[in-house]
Amino acid sequence: MKLQGLHGQVVDGLGRSLAAGELRAGEVVRLEDVQERFGVSRTVAREAVRVLESKRLVSSRPRVGVTVRPMSAWNLYDPQVIRWRLTSPGREAQLRELAELRAAVEPAAAALAARHAGPAVRQELVEHARALTAAAAAGDKEGFVTADAAFHRVLLGAAGNGMFAQLAEVTEELIVARRDLLLLPERLDNPAVRRHLDVAAAVAEGRGEDAARAAGSIVAAARDEVESILGGTACPLVT
């Protein structure tokens, strides 16, 4: 959920401060502090705190104030929390966690999609894979990000597992953040990108093991490139 206007600015500002560790676990924040920092009314400050409570970043109690919760208590699957962590000094940990999550889930999702997806969904996955590779070959970064997000959303949804499907928001946030954080390479066309066609073909033909193997190669390359970034070689992420 993307919040607009002044309310959204306060939520975003506080969220970034929390992700950056500027507000630490156990620290108490008063509504007056929020009002003063952002120049907003008490109503706006209170509503912003409620949003952060819904994401489990803070807790609020009468006569105590707003207390920052430890990161282990946060809703780490919330797309906005992911974005805050990706733009924080803790970006390395978030990149690694996302890579590990995808490596654990996407091959299984591909195998399940080959078993459960209906004909229309199988065709849709093929079309997104073709659009993705075409955009990569053309150097169309906007088209690439759009097709990439759509491909992974359909793949996770096609598994027939509602919990996998909800992880699509996590993957999509990473894909969009790569563009916004300038983590896309100059040349998008590479073997890992083209492997999306292999995943789509295997799913379309009901070849679960092949679909899992192809998806595994994509996320393994992504994980390796994350480690390259963390090692300081600034290698861009694969999707």
Image (cartoon, grey):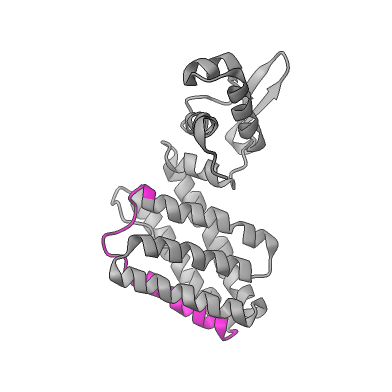
The N terminus - image quarter: top right
The extreme left residue here reads 186
Where are the magenta residues, as a range?
180-206
The extreme bottom residue here reads 205
The C terminus - image quarter: bottom left
Q: Is residue 43 left or right of residue 21?
A: right
Q: Position of residue 74 (x, y in %)?
A: 61, 38
Position of residue 21 relative to residue 100, above or below, is above
Q: Is residue 43 left or right of residue 145?
A: right
In magenta segment, residue 146 = no
Q: Residue at x 55, y 56 (%)?
A: 101
Position of residue 42 relative to residue 222, above or below, is above
Q: Residue at x 46, y 32 (%)?
A: 20
Q: Is residue 29 visible?
A: no
Quadrant of res 78: top right
In magenta segment, residue 187 = yes
Q: Is residue 237 left or right of residue 149?
A: left
Q: Is residue 137 left or right of residue 114?
A: left
Q: Position of residue 5 (x, y in %)?
A: 50, 34
